[in-house]
Amino acid sequence: MAEPLDGLTFYRRAHGNTIHVRDLRGGHHTIVSRLGRYVATAQTTSSPWYGRIEWRGDRYTRSQLPDMKALFATTVPGEVAPSPWVPLPPDRATTRRTPNQGMTADMALRFPHLVPPVSATTYAHALGLQGSYEWCHLIAHSMRGQDGPANVVAGTSHNNSEQLVVENLLSCYRREWGIEMRVSARVRDAGVGRRLGLAIRYEVRIDGATRTMYLDCQTQRAPSGIHVEVMMEGLARWINLSLRQRVPASPTPQQIRQVLEDCPQFAKPRLKRDRNDDLGNTNAALDKRRKRARRE
C-alpha cells in the first residue's frame, strides 16, 4: 500500500479517530481536531546517540563476515540461548545496571589468572583479539533485558553502537500494540570463546510477519551517518506499513498540509543529533551519500 507522502505513513489505531503519523526515523506524531483546526503534535522521537555515530562518514559499513545468516543454521553447545519473543516494553527501564554488566563472576571462572573484574576488552585481548570491546546486551537493559551471561556477549564498541541504532528505533514504537522482538547471538566456540559474539540477529514480529536484521559483533568501523539512516529507514518503513495495514488512514490535503506546518521536520526529516556530536555534513551531502549507499 503506497504512502500518501514520501517517507510518511498515516494510520489509525483500533480505537479512536486520531490519525497517527510515522516518519522513517520512527518519529510519532498525531493529528487531532482542535477548534475546527487540525493540529499535529509530537509524541515520540529518537533517544540520544551518546556521541557514538561518526556523522562525517559516508560509507555504509559492510560486515566482515561472509554470511551472517549462515551462522544461525548451526548452534554451539553452551552458547547464549535466544531470547523468547517479548513485547516492546511501554517505557524505558530506569534501574541501574549490575557492575560489569553482570559478567564478573563468569569471567572469574574462565580466567582466574586475570585481575577481576574482567572487562570485555580484557576478555577479547586474552583471546588474541585487538581493539575496544564492550559487554553487549541481546535484549537491551533499557528494554528490561537482564545483566549477566544469559543475555550478554562481548562485541566491539562499534557493534554496540549499531545495536543502539536498532534499540533507539524500536523504542519509538513502545506504545504500539502487538510488536514483539527476539534476539539471538552466535559465539566463537564452546570453550573460553563462548562469550565472544560473532553475530547478533534481531527479529521483529507484527501480526505474524517477521523482519530480520543481522549485526556483525566484530565490526571494526564506527557506524557512519549514512549507515545509521539506511538501517533505520529499512526497519521503520516495514513497521510503519505494517501498522497502516491494520487500520489505514487517508489524510486529506488539508491534514497533510497541517502536519508539514506544525512539524516542519517531516518535510525534510533528519536524525536528531546530540549537542556534542559532529554534525559533519550538510543535509544535501547526506542526501547524495544516502543515494550512493543504496546503489552499493
Image (spheres, helix red, strand yellow):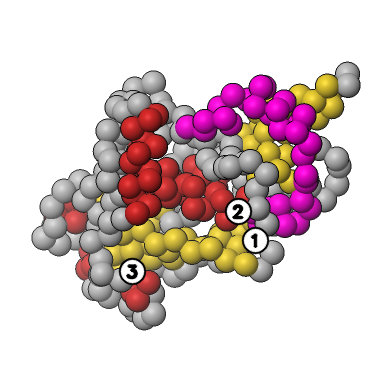
Callout in the foreground (2, 3): 2
Q: Residue 13 placed where, x, y %?
A: 78, 47
Distance from Cα at disc 2 to Cα at disc 1: 8 Å
Instruction: Please give the name of the residue rendered at 70% of the width and 28% of the height, measured from the top-left corner.
Output: 257
Q: Main secondary structure of the magenta part?
A: helix
Does the image show residue 244? Answer: yes
Rendered image: mark on residue 68: 3
Residue 1's place in the image compared with 284, above or below, is: below
What kind of element bears circle 3? helix
Distance from Cα at disc 3 to Cα at disc 1: 23 Å
Instruction: Please give the name of the residue rendered at 15% of the width and 62% of the height, measured from the top-left corner.
Output: 127
Q: Which residue is mark 1?
A: 206
What kind of element bears circle 2? helix
Q: Which residue is mark 2?
A: 239
Q: Residue 40 placed where, x, y %?
A: 72, 27
Left or right of residue 263, residue 68 in this image? left
Residue 104's place in the image compared with 71, above or below, is: above
